[in-house]
Amino acid sequence: MWQLGVLKDALDRLDVLHEEWRQTRDSLAIDARPGTPAYDDALAEYHAESWSYLDDWASHGQAVLDINTAARRAPSCLAPRPTATTAAGRTSTVRR
């Protein structure tokens, strides 16, 4: 599924942008708080750069849910589901 590659790349880029935002925020003047032009302009730039990667998640994120649904419905060789006959006829093998 090519969508997973798009999602991974978008997540990686969002991580980088978030770290850059934290560094930018930490380097702002002490009086630059939300509502001041210095802070709001830097935050707006961060949001603008992040938008396309968030859009990738909005567009392709359903692939993750589809994989999860398929995995939950698929039989597992690691833990087979008990059948009514084996569950009812099972005897304890625990030693006391």
Image (cartoon, rainbow, N blue to C red):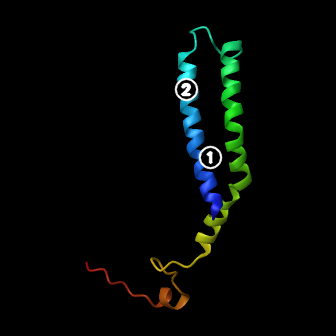
Q: Position of residue 11 (x, y in %)?
A: 59, 46
> Residue at left 64%, top 67%?
69
Along the viewing direction, whichever of 93 and 33 lies nearer the viewer = 33
Q: Is label 1 in a helix, a strand or a loop?
A: helix
Q: Quarter of the image containing the N terminus?
A: bottom right
Kind of residue at disc 2 = Arg
91 left or right, relative to 32: left
Label annotation for residue 10: 1
For label 2, the residue is 22
> Residue at left 58%, top 76%?
74
Q: Residue furthest left?
A: 96
Kind of residue at disc 1 = Ala
Question: Could you give the CA–CA distance between mark 2 and mark 1, rounded to whole angstroms?
Answer: 18 Å
Q: How many numbered circles does the render carry? A: 2
Q: Position of residue 67 (x, y in %)?
A: 62, 66
**First of labels 2, 1 by sequence position:** 1
Q: Is residue 10 above or below residue 24?
A: below
Q: Position of residue 16 (x, y in %)?
A: 55, 36
Crowding near the residue tagged with mark 1, few <14, some 14–19, many ≥20 C-alpha atoms within 10 Å: some
Q: Is residue 51 above or below residue 93?
A: above
